[in-house]
Image (spheres, grey):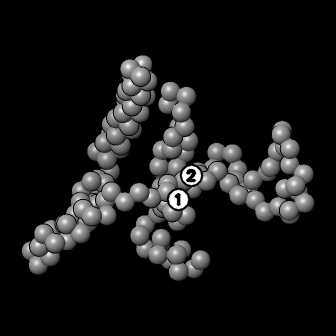
Amino acid sequence: MEAETNNQDAVTDDWAQALEEQASSAREEDANDSAPDFETANAPVKSSSAGSGSVQDIQMVLDIPVQLSVELGRTKVPIKHILQLAQGSVVELDALAGEPMDVLINGYLIAQGEVVVVNEKFGIRLTDIVTPSERMRRVSRG
């Protein structure tokens, strides 16, 4: 049991180190860029008319779990091909090697990113965040 806890701590430390490296490189880019940093741009704005009720409303939803998935690619195949699949079969996807992968929350595209490997585990580094207006446009279309 203790060995499992130590292993989890080591994995957590590896991810923390990878995230810190990403954050430091992002800070260097931000120093050269005139755009506001992510934390400042997305910080909650306190309004005197809203009061503390709005903050409490937000706090209520912060712990609601959502399904985050990363999509490598898609394809459409007839059922007869699915029935012929066996161990070792290859299914061609519509995505090209090196293309950014879609990051979905409850099935809705929110970002794109690239695969990273830390301590033999996969992760995704976000390279593009879908704007709220673009998300709304996609939801209304589909």
Amino acid type assigned to the residue bearing label 1 in the image: Leu
Task: Please tell me the numbered disc located at residue 24.
Answer: none
Circle 2/circle 1 CB separation < 8 Å: yes
Residue drawn at x 86%, y 49% as measured from the top left: 85
Above or below: residue 11 compared with residue 49: above
Q: Amino acid at mark 2?
A: Val
Q: Position of residue 48 (x, y in %)?
A: 9, 74
Q: Badge 2 is on which residue?
A: 70
Q: How many marks?
A: 2
First reached walking from the N terminus: tag 2 or tag 1: 2
Per the image, label 1 sits on a secondary structure element best described as strand
The residue depicted at 53 percent of the width and 80 percent of the height is 140
- Look at the image and tell me in which quarter the N terminus lies: top left
Residue 16, image x and y in percent? 36, 33
Q: CA distance from mark 2 to mark 1?
A: 6 Å
Residue for point 48% across, 50% down: 127
Q: Is residue 137 visible?
A: yes
Above or below, 68 against 50 in this view is above
Taking 79 as reference, is 7 left or right?
A: left
Q: Residues within 10 Å of mark 1 (few under 14, many from 20)?
A: some
Q: Secondary structure at mark 2?
A: strand
Q: Can see residue 111? A: no
Query: Label 1: which residue?
Result: 104
> Which residue is at 59% across, 77% downward?
142
Judged from this view, the residue extending furthest toward the top is: 3
In x, y percent, where is residue 12? Answer: 39, 31
Figure quadrant of residue 78: bottom right
